[in-house]
Amino acid sequence: MGTILAVGGVAAAMDRDKVKQEVRQRIEALPGVVAFQFLDKDFKRELVSLEKEAESNGACWGLMPFVNKGVWAAMKREEQFVIVIEGTTLLLGVSNGLVFIEDKTGQVVGEWITADRLEQLRARDDVCFVSDDFVLYSGLDIKGEPRFVLPDVDFPYLDGVEGVENVSSGSISTLADDYIRDRLGYLETKHWTHLVGFDITKD
C-alpha cells in the first residue's frame, strides 16, 4: 500500500511540474517578457512583507488608505510567478480599470481611464479631471473613508493551458517592484513587473 501511495505522489509531482513547465513556456514566449520566476517560500514571504508595508504607508503620500486586491488574490493561489516586462510593452489589457478609488461599499469614486474613456467622459458635469488619465466623480454619496485600490487584473495568457485554473494577477507596489527588478537583475531599467497566481486542477 505504501509503495502505491509513493508512486501516486511521484506521479502527482510530475504532473504539477509538467503544468508549471507549460506555464513557463507560454509566458516566456510573450512579446516583451524579459524574465520569469516562480516564487519559492522565501521570495513569496518577502513580497508579502513588502506589500503589507506599502499598504501601511498608504497612497497619495500617505493621505489615503491603500489595498492591493490583485496581489492578495494571486497570493491565495497554489502557485505564483512574477514577470519582468519591457517598459514600452503593453501586456495587460487597458479596457478594465487598473487603478481606482472606492468607498467602503465598493462604490467607485475615482479611476484611471484610457484615452477612449477620456473622450467619453469629457462632456459629463459630474467628472473632475485630476489628470489626463485619472478622474474623480462628484455628486456621489460616499460612505466611509475612500481607499486607493489595485484590483485583480485580467490575465488571459494562461487560457487553454491544461491543468491551470483560477488565475489571478495583480499590479505590484513600488516597493515590491523595486525588489523584484533588483533580485532579477533589472533594477537600473524602466521595465515593469507583474504577479500572477493560479491553481492546478485536481483529478
Image (spheres, rainbow, N blue to C red):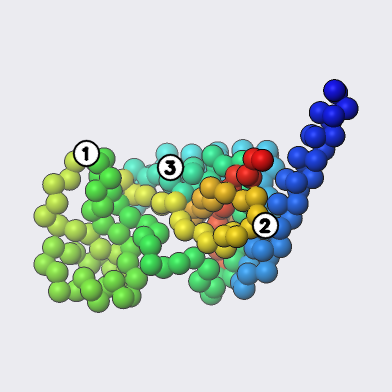
Q: Position of residue 172 (x, y in %)?
A: 51, 53
Say which amino acid is labelled 3: Glu
In space, the residues marked 3 and 2 are separated at their CA atoms by 30 Å
Question: As displayed, is residue 173 above or below residue 160?
Answer: above
Question: As displayed, is residue 140 above or below residue 87?
Answer: above
What element does badge 1 sit on? loop
Residue 144, label in figure: 1
Q: Residue at x 53, y 68 (%)?
A: 91
Of pointers 1 and 3, the one earlier in the residue sequence: 3
Question: As displayed, is residue 143 above or below residue 37?
Answer: above
Of pointers 1 and 2, the one earlier in the residue sequence: 2
What is the quadrant of the N terminus in the image?
top right
Q: Which residue is mark 2?
A: 23
Residue 181, quarter of picture: bottom right
Q: Residue at x 64, y 45 (%)?
A: 200
Q: Which residue is mark 3?
A: 55
Q: Hey, which residue is sitting farthest top in the picture?
A: 1
| Near-viewer residue (78 or 51) | 78
